[in-house]
Image (cartoon, coloured by chain):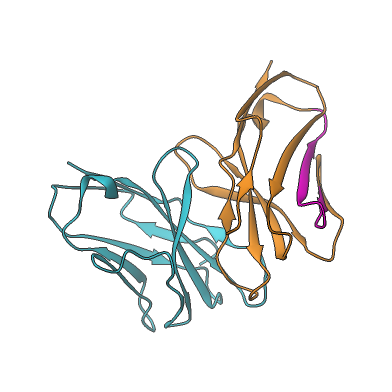
Amino acid sequence: GEEVAQTPKHLVRGEGQKAKLYCAPIKGHSYVFWYQQVLKNEFKFLISFQNENVFDETGMPKERFSAKCLPNSPCSLEIQATKLEDSAVYFCASSQSSGLTQYFGPGTRLTVL
Amino acid sequence: KQEVTQIPAALSVPEGENLVLNCSFTDSAIYNLQWFRQDPGKGLTSLLLIQSSQREQTSGRLNASLDKSSGRSTLYIAASQPGDSATYLCAVRPDTGANSKLTFGKGITLSVRP
């Protein structure tokens, strides 16, 4: 597609439940990025992929967060045993190779109660 | 560790005014800098991307400049309109790879009064 698609738009989970978010990058883009926006305008990088390979995972809280980008499937970000502080908007972005613009999806708002 | 600062956090101007939004970064070893716009409850819209070798980029009423050595970028908005009201964020990509992560500033929330 011509835009980054993210589903669902909103997700509500009780503390301790699992949450799974999906991202379909722009067709032809090889790189996918996940960011977390916790407070207003505080963006935190989580992880990036080059095709199905992890490119940079330095921002991932690995004990509960995991992500995948498999061929012919949307990329996913999964949070096991959600905590209150995981409440945030999670943005996915994609780009072509070599330093071109990152295009962002509309985000998934996760609320942990 | 790269830090990106945008001051002030909020700005209110009358319609028609030309304005400059500032962005500074602590580590000048950047690959490029990107300016985004975020409307309330929405995702990010990319406005301009400046490569580290460039001095400025223009798109319509927007002009972004980059002074890499001093760690500064500005976004100039000409003849501001109420529709320009949004939060403007700058983000830098380090010079460690073409597609590494973006480090964001906290944004400037702009309000253009009719």
The residue at the far right in this view is B55
Region rendered in magenta: B65-79
Q: Which of B17 and B83 is in front in this view?
A: B17
Q: Where's residue A103, x and y in %?
A: 57, 60
Q: In which quarter of the image is residue A34?
A: bottom left
Residue depicted at x 63% and y 43%: B5
Confirm whether the magenta stretch covers residue B70: yes
Shade of chain B as shown in the rendered figure? orange
- Compared with A89, B53 (above or below) is below
Q: Nearer the viewer, residue A28 or A45?
A: A45
Q: Where's residue A67, x and y in %?
A: 33, 71
- Compared with A2, B70 (above or below) is above
Tell me if B96 is positioned left or right of B22 in this view.
left
Question: Magenta region's main secondary structure?
Answer: strand
Tell me if B68 is positioned left or right of B105 in this view.
right
Numbered-mark total: 0
Q: Where's residue B109, x and y in %?
A: 59, 31
Q: Quadrant of residue A111?
A: top left
Residue depicted at x 45% and y 50%: A106
Tell me if B9 is positioned left or right of A17 in this view.
right
**Chain coloured cyan in the rendered structure:** A
